Every structure is written in structure tokens, then in C-alpha cells.
Image (cartoon, rainbow, N blue to C red):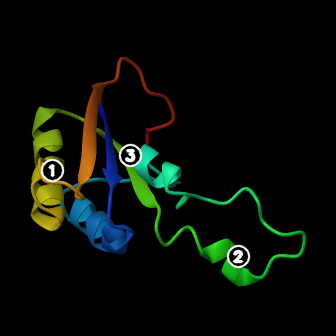
Amino acid sequence: MYLVTFVLHDPDLLEELLDAWTKAGVEGATVLFSSGMGRFRQKQTMRDDLPLIPSLDDFYEAPQTLNRTVFTVAKDDAMVDTILAVTQKLVGDLKNPDTGVMIVTPVARAYGLEA
């Protein structure tokens, strides 16, 4: 069993990515807003300085530029390969800049995944 963590650079591709993963056999995934060091240093991250009485625009300004970190559990190497293939088909070769970062980590134990 493996934990597959993917940081998607282009948030506009999230729906397509989730659809592709679902068609590939992924049964569930968790999505988080995230930011890399470069965006953080450019001040393009989630704000922690909202005004006392914020407008809706204040809340939605940063999430449009944030990455999306998606993680799921794959049962075996074949599923990891499938997830990688459908991901790269959508975003491009992960060796290219501004596509994303995928990390695959072995899982010794997992609880709460049973259907």
C-alpha cells in the first residue's frame, strides 16, 4: 500500500484531475489548498491579515493562485503507475516546470480506509 501525494500547480485542472483519478480506479482522495516556498515569498499565499470586517473578495483572493495538494492511497505498484500515467496525461510530464510534484510513500499501516 502507498500514499500518493500530488501537488497540482494549476488549480484550474483539479476537477479534471479528480475525474481522471476516479476513472483510473481511485476510490477517494483528499484535497488541500497549499503553497510552495516561491509563492509564499512572493506573498501569493493564504492571507493571515484579513481586515476586521472583510469582504468576500478578501476571502477569495488567494485561493485562486494556490496549489492543490491531493492525496490518496494506492493498493499496489500497478495502481501507482496508473495514477502517474493519468496525471501526466493531464498536466504534462512532471519533469517539466509548473506541472506538479508527486511523491509516493510506502504505508506500513492504515486505519479507517475500509468501505
Q: Earlier in the sequence, mark 3 or mark 1?
A: 3
Q: Residues within 10 Å of mark 1 (few under 14, many from 20)?
A: some
Numbered label attached to residue 94: 1
Q: Is residue 109 left or right of residue 51?
A: left
Q: Position of residue 114 (x, y in %)?
A: 43, 39
N-term mark: 2 or 3: 2
Whether 1 is drawn above or below 70: the answer is above
Q: Nearer the viewer, mark 2 or mark 1?
A: 2
Residue marked by disc 3: 71
Residue 58: assigned label: 2
Q: Secondary structure at mark 3?
A: strand
* Residue located 11% across and 47% down the image: 95
In this rendering, position of residue 93 left or right of residue 97: left
Amino acid at dot 3: Phe
Q: Quadrant of residue 62?
A: bottom right
Q: Is residue 34 visible?
A: no
Amino acid on which the number 1 mark rests in the picture:
Leu
Give the CA distance from mark 2 to mark 1. Answer: 32 Å
Percent position of residue 59, x then y: 68, 73
